[in-house]
Image: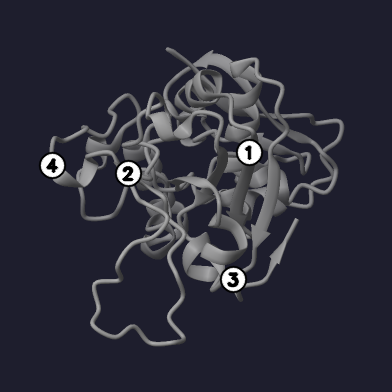
């Protein structure tokens, strides 16, 4: 048994629309004989909350409780059996044709000593490395390294009092003006709530916020349902940190438009 996030369903509010059952890539939700949503098995729920964004009645919420751990291997088999191999490709933490247990919760990404994880603060002005830079080339606004949440140190000096941007991985690829519109003047942390091992993300973000007390906190997510869980993680982290801070949210659509 572990204490973790998991879905809770208010049957009185559920209207049986079934939208949550299709939004959940792990197949954790279904409708019963009374046309009410129920949790098929707790091991199938990853606690990311993609279903929350599609529920029209507010019948779903994420709670913390003592329960069995999310099992990506069993979930993969469940989705492959009930929805097919293509649907199984989207199961959190597992991929068809791989040993899913390697990605089970409880195992965190190893922090290697390779040069790619070495902390670097990038100066404001730097050479492009090209003999002649095209006039239309966009300037990079990245000011530190590393940027992936698994690799960043909560005690890196450049985070102290900074204007902090926490962005879902795909936002920089979908928003063409990401550097100028969102990143300029900020320090950056990226994460993917769907594909990363997120078990310790809330605690790590809370420590980053608690130790550095950023002057401002911005969260950029994609418009796809599963991405909204990153914003909820940040909200939980702020609450856990005890720092008086309200994260500002930006949502990037698949066609590169941005909204609040």
- Residues at badges 3 and 2 in contact (C-beta under 8 Å)? no
- Residue drawn at (49%, 63%), measured in percent from left and top? 172
Q: Which labelled disc corresponds to residue 217?
A: 1
Q: CA distance from mark 3 to mark 4?
A: 34 Å
Q: Earlier in the sequence, mark 1 or mark 2?
A: 2
Distance (Cα) linking label 4 and label 2: 12 Å
Q: Quadrant of the C terminus?
A: bottom right
Evaluate if marks 3 and 4 touch, with contact meaning CB atoms under 8 Å apart. no
Locate residue 28: give its quadrant. top right
- Reading the image, the residue beneath label 4 is 114
Disc 3 to disc 2, C-alpha distance: 26 Å
Q: Which of the two residues, 167 or 18, is positioned nearer the viewer here?
A: 167
What is the CA distance from the residue labelled 3 to the residue labelled 1? 23 Å
Identify the disc placed on residue 254.
3
Q: Residue at x 64, y 67 (%)?
A: 253
Q: Nearer the viewer, mark 3 or mark 1?
A: 1
Classify mark 1: helix, strand or loop: strand
Q: Earlier in the sequence, mark 3 or mark 2?
A: 2
Q: From the viewer's perspective, is the residue at label 3 or at label 4 nearer? A: 4
Residue 81 position within the rendered picture, expressed as x and y whole percent measured from the top left: 39, 52
- Mark found first going from the N terminus, 3 or 1: 1
Is residue 205 shown left or right of residue 103? right
Query: Between disc 3 and disc 4, whose residue precedes?
Result: 4
Instruction: Give the residue number, with chain letter if any, for mark 2.
Output: 146
């Amino acid at each position: 048994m572990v204490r973790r996030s998991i879905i809770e369903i208010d049957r009185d509010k559920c209207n049986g629309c079934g939208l949550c059952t299709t939004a959940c890539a792990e197949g954790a939700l279904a409708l019963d004989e009374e046309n009410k949503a129920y949790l098929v098995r707790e091991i199938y729920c990853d606690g990311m909350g993609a279903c929350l964004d599609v529920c029209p009645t507010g019948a779903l919420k994420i709670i913390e409780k003592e329960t069995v751990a999310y099992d990506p291997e069993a979930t993969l088999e469940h989705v492959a059996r009930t929805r097919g191999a293509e649907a199984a490709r989207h199961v959190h933490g597992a991929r068809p044709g791989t040993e899913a247990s390697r990605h089970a919760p409880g195992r965190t990404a190893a922090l290697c000593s390779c040069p790619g994880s070495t902390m670097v603060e990038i100066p404001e002005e730097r050479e492009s490395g090209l003999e002649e830079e095209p006039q239309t080339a966009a300037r990079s606004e990245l000011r530190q390294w590393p940027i992936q949440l698994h690799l960043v140190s909560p005690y890196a000096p450049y985070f102290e009092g900074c204007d902090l941007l926490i962005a879902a991985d795909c936002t920089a690829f979908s928003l063409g003006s990401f550097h100028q519109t969102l990143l300029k003047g900020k320090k950056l942390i990226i994460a993917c709530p769907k594909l990363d091992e997120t078990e310790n993300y809330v605690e790590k973000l809370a420590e980053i916020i608690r130790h550095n007390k950023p002057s401002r906190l911005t969260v950029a997510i994609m418009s796809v349902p599963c991405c909204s869980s990153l914003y909820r993680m940040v909200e939980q982290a702020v609450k856990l940190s005890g720092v008086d801070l309200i994260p500002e949210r930006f949502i990037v659509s698949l066609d590169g438009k941005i909204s609040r």
